[in-house]
Amino acid sequence: MRFDVLTLFPDMFGVVRDLGVTGRGHAQGRWALRAWNPRDYTHDVHRTVDDRPYGGGPGMVMLAQPLEDTLAAVRADRAATGAPPARVALLSPTGRRFDQAAAGELAQGGGLILVCGRYEGVDQRFIDRCVDEEWSLGDFVLSGGELAAMAMIDATVRLLPGVLNDAESALQDSFHRNVSGLLDSPHYTRPEVHASLAVPAPLMSGHHARIQRWRRDQSLALTAARRPELIEQARQRGELSKEDERVLAALRDVSAQADTSAS
Ligand SMILES: C[S@@+](CC[C@H](N)C(=O)[O-])C[C@H]1O[C@@H](n2cnc3c(N)ncnc32)[C@H](O)[C@@H]1O
């Protein structure tokens, strides 16, 4: 898998390329990254990559031409090195929300060409001519697409075979289909008692089925409290067992009783 990133701040990508599990996977050759600076594809002495917006208003807009010239260089390099053609994805708050399912799909492919906007954004004609898809990290505005691109790369690369030390761990993570798309359960490690708080008894039982049930119940409770729509989605996919429904009904009873005694 290879990511090419168009960015005015190529140095930022050392974080995903060199550190942590993604850094180890990169060093092992499980994925590749090249960052391309549109300033290197300008032809004026100031290496201009932005200009004022037509119609007035604050801020600057990224010029289409340096981005198109950078993209041509990326495509030529991919062809010369035998990398398969890749789709072009713009990071944008107006894009489709990136999520775990999207990371899973991306992990099945050969990679992406990611375009990081800065300033007020990118000249629309570049988007119309060159961009295949737009991805948002969430309903907030970042100063640039780099952090969003790194989040996409990290979430994708950790799903590649061999990148995580224990492949099981990704299967247990929040949102994974293996856990019905629910939120992850709490985790504990040594010591058994910390600040007078003991590790929950089921985790100390050594009884696999009991531990699994406790984790599932915790996931159900946390998801019902924080992301009830994920419970409904799991239900509609037929991924909740009778025992899950019994636990959820008990949680609803407890919450109804709490409401009654508060009023
Ligand atoms: C300051 S933002 C521009 C915001 C734009 N004027 C708007 O309101 O939609 C600069 C760049 O940061 C990136 N960006 C900002 N927020 C983002 C988000 N939530 N997801 C993905 N990229 C984002 C985009 O590449 C964007 O072009």
Image (tube, rainbow, N blue to C red):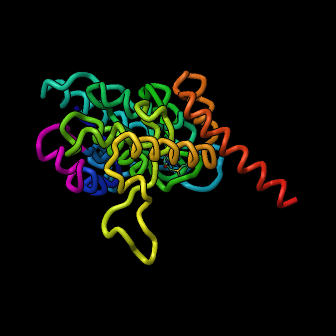
Q: Is residue 149 visible?
A: yes
In percent of the image, x 27 and y 56: which residue is there? 15
In the image as oriented, which residue stretches furthest toward the right? Answer: 263
Residue 101 versus residue 27 in the image, above or below? above
In percent of the image, x 71 and y 43: which residue is there? 252
Residue 89 versus residue 17 in the image, above or below? above
Instruction: Please state, as top left, top right, bottom left or bottom right, where the N terminus lies in the image.
Output: top left
Task: Report the magenta residues as a range.
Answer: 17-34
Instruction: Please state, as top left, top right, bottom left or bottom right, where the C terminus lies in the image.
Output: bottom right
Q: Answer with left or right where residue 49 lies relative to residue 248.
A: left
In percent of the image, x 55 and y 33: which residue is there? 243
In the figure, residue 109 lies in which quadrant? top left
Q: Answer with left or right where residue 79 lies relative to residue 56.
A: left
Q: Answer with left or right where residue 11 lies relative to residue 151.
A: left
x then y, percent, for residue 207? 34, 46
Q: Can residue 6 be seen in this view?
A: no
